[in-house]
Image: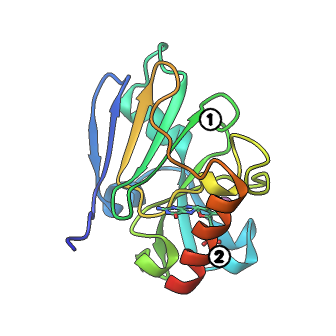
Amino acid sequence: MTEAMSLIVDGEVERSLKLAAHDLRSYPGQVAMGDIEPRKAGQVAVKLQDVLVACGMKQTATHLGLHGTRDDFHASIPLEPVIDRGLIIFEQDGASLAVEAGGPFRFYIPNHAACQMDEIDECANVKFLDRIELTAGRGFDNRPQDEDEHERLHRRQAEGE
Ligand SMILES: Nc1nc2c(c(=O)[nH]1)N[C@H]1C(S)=C(S)[C@@H](COP(=O)(O)O)O[C@H]1N2
Ligand SMILES: [Mo]
């Protein structure tokens, strides 16, 4: 499988972007993930907010489409609750974020709700993120709908690790 090493930002934006890890490294607000989540020490993120400024998000955007093509996992979440806290992890220990850690790009919401407790839950921390799509209204979302489906997904993920 070819590795998606860039992150597309498109949809309700003034300028579509195709970002590489080194583009994100030049962003002003670099976040040390170890300060937020000790298990993620060594990982570095940028703020979603800075990406939205860079693409010139339109007023019409209401939702954030988070696409992980590698395993066909997609979430569409309301922008408002994550606009100030959403992060994009792109680096670990000076190298690109490994696939094992959900790289090369991973969406992350600090203090996320537990799985399936909210539209914005742990399940929305999309791994292998290769496209951020701003949409007017809710977009495509194939996160598990019920407990069984979710349980199966978690089991598959645990086996893959
Ligand atoms: N691309 C992708 N991202 C994903 C998933 C997935 O199956 N594929 N699972 C989600 C779910 S259901 C959860 S609970 C978290 C688990 O993250 P963790 O493996 O880092 O604990 O990742 C989320 N992100
Ligand atoms: Mo989950």
Residue at the image point whose x is 51% and y is 35% from the top? 64
Q: Circle 1 sits in a helix, a strand or a loop, which is it?
A: loop
User: Callout 2, which amino acid?
Assistant: Lys
Where residue 83 appears, as percent x and y from the top left, is: 62, 35
Q: Is residue 120 left or right of residue 97?
A: right
From mark 2 to mark 1, how far is it between C-alphas? 21 Å
Q: Give the mark nearest the N terminus, 2 or 1.
A: 2
Residue, far front: 148
Where residue 106 appears, as percent x and y from the top left, is: 49, 61
- Can the viewer see residue 98 in this picture? no
Q: Which residue is mark 2?
A: 40
Q: Is residue 61 left or right of residue 124?
A: left
User: Callout 1, which amino acid?
Assistant: Ile
Of the pair 95 and 10, the residue shown nearer to us = 10
Q: Mark 2 packing: few (<14 Cα in 10 Å), some, or many (20+)?
A: some
Q: Is residue 21 left or right of residue 121?
A: left
Residue at the image point whose x is 58% and y is 67% from the top? 153
Q: Quadrant of residue 156?
A: bottom right
| Number of numbered discs overlaid on the protein picture | 2
Residue 83 got which mark? 1
Residue at the image point whose x is 66% and y is 28% from the top? 80
Is label 1's Cβ within 8 Å of ligand 1?
no
Q: Quadrant of residue 42?
A: bottom right
Where residue 96 appears, as percent x and y from the top left, is: 38, 74
**Marks 2 and 1 in Cβ contact (< 8 Å):** no
Of the pair 33 and 122, the residue shown nearer to us = 122
Q: Circle 2 sits in a helix, a strand or a loop, which is it?
A: helix
Where residue 150 appears, as percent x and y from the top left, is: 65, 60
